[in-house]
Image (spheres, helix red, strand yellow):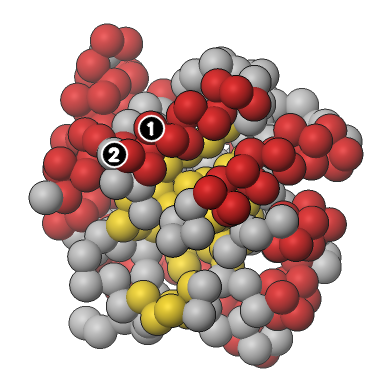
Amino acid sequence: MIKRSINIKGELYSFDKPLVMGIVNMTPDSFFDGGKYNDLDQAKLRVDKMVKEGVDILDIGGYSTRPGADVIPSDVEWNRIKDIIEYSSSKYKNIIISVDSFRSDIIRKAFDSGADIINDISGGNYDKNMFKTASELRMPYILMHIRGTPKTMLDKTDYKELIPDIMDYFKKKIDMLYDLDVVDVIIDPGFGFAKDYEQNYELLRNLKLFQIFELPLLVGLSRKSFIKKKYGEDKTLEGTLELNKIALENGADIIRVHDVKENKLLIK
């Protein structure tokens, strides 16, 4: 099935080969690295290392979306990410910069600082101006599936039918984006977001079905709790690689990861 090409930085990406998105968490309470890189100097080293290892997209975020995460003010989120966005976009002009935020005011500032893509975990649910902002800035938009908020999502796993419900969500949201002339859309089924252990694996088994939208597909599995539960605390990387292999074989075009080198080798 032919998927729609996406215009990023004035270049058409047809996803003939999968891309690796490297996670740059500028939060003190990230579920995986626990704020290890939220110091600017450490973040710069992390970005440099990812670029050296062949990262295609840097996904920079300053708001923790782990289950139960607290709300933080917009200015705190922006202060966490502004310098590393400017550093990355000015030093690595060929690398795509994605901003992991659900706030349209953050997206506008990030765009002015050199960001290329919106990665919105809320699917436009948390900020009524997000879709309009994507349209006005002509930025590609990553549309993720979620129910509730990071604080409440673990209580929102009562689907009538998991896959049809997620399909319906995407159909409605994509139509809304297209109505606003946002045509550069990437879909993300939202592994770990309002899905329990069994539902995450059901989603992975049925990943091919999402090709019906003929849009690039992003998968974010890296080191999440359902991997830890299946493979053990000390084997989350091995588990991530095994599940990313399944995802790639079933149509994933972008894999969002903590470990760039290992996942580039997986694709190769």
Quadrant of residue 3 within the rendered picture: bottom left
**Residue closest to the far left:** 268
SS at circle 1: helix
Query: What's the mark number on residue 49?
Result: 1
Can you say whether 242 is above or below 1 in the image?
Answer: above
Q: Kindly indicate the quadrant of the structure image that contains residue 120.
A: bottom right
Residue bearing the label numbered 2: 53
Q: Amino acid at mark 1?
A: Lys
Looking at the rendered structure, which numbered label has been put on residue 108? none
**Cβ–Cβ under 8 Å for marks 2 and 1:** yes
Q: Is residue 263 left or right of residue 67?
A: left
Find residue 39 and report its horizontal and vertical position in percent.
Answer: 64, 20
Residue 30 visible in rendering: no
Q: Is residue 77 above or below residue 4?
A: above
The residue under label 2 is which amino acid type?
Glu
- Percent of width and height locating residue 99: 62, 51
User: In terms of secondary structure, where does tag 2 sit?
Assistant: loop
Residue visible at 44% across and 61% down in the picture: 94
Residue that appears at 38% across and 32% down: 49
Residues packed near mark 2 inside 10 Å, few (<14), some (14 to 19) or many (20 plus): some
